[in-house]
Image (cartoon, rainbow, N blue to C red):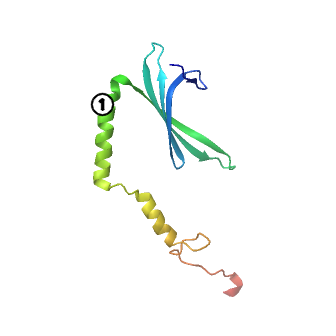
């Protein structure tokens, strides 16, 4: 099977991407020197520099066939536990709507006390 060469020259046999907000997860099948396949999972997160330019921070996991069954079992158990304990609603989104309701049209939080400007001449 002929795949696509990536920037390091390694051949990618099969690839899928999952976009999730500022993060993208890449699932790539690659080939070892011996001709076997393995999986890389890469998290790429868009970050911003102080000057406004952006860069991508990446974290990568290499997963080999002999670890697939255990990885899948643990992933299924952990995701089931989280969903059973906390449900499918994303908590940060729930809190964001509460924050938006407390903000005025300038984006200021209305729960913060308002201050009046005074000068020392007023005292």
* Residue that sits furthest to the front in the current view: 1
Q: In this view of the protein, which residue sits in the foreground, 66 or 48?
A: 66
Residue at image coords 33%, 32%: 71
Badge 1 marks a residue whose secondary structure is helix
Tell whether 121 sits left or right of 87: right
Position in image of residue 70 (x %, y %): 30, 30
Quarter residue 64 falls in: top left
Residue at image coords 43%, 21%: 37
Position in image of residue 88 (x %, y %): 36, 54
Q: Count the labels in the image.
A: 1
What residue is pinned by disc 1? 70
Quarter residue 87 falls in: bottom left
Q: Residues within 10 Å of mark 1 (few under 14, many from 20)?
A: few
Q: From the image, which quarter does the C terminus lie in?
A: bottom right
Residue at image coords 44%, 28%: 39
Position in image of residue 11 (x %, y %): 54, 21
Tell whether 99 sits left or right of 82: right
Depicted 16 relative to depicted 11: above or below: below
Residue at image coords 29%, 46%: 80
Position in image of residue 81 (x %, y %): 28, 47
């Amino acid at each position: 099977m002929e795949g696509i060469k990536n920037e390091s020259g390694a051949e990618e046999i099969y690839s899928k991407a999952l976009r999730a907000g500022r993060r993208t997860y890449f699932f790539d099948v690659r080939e070892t020197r011996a001709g076997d396949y393995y999986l890389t999972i890469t998290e790429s997160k868009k970050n911003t520099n102080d000057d406004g330019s952006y860069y991508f921070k990446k974290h990568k996991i290499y997963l080999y066939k002999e670890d697939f069954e255990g990885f899948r079992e643990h992933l299924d158990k952990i995701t089931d536990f989280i969903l059973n304990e906390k449900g499918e609603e994303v908590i940060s989104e729930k809190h964001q709507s509460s924050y938006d309701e407390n903000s005025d049209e300038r984006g200021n939080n209305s729960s913060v006390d308002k201050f009046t400007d005074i000068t020392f001449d007023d005292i």
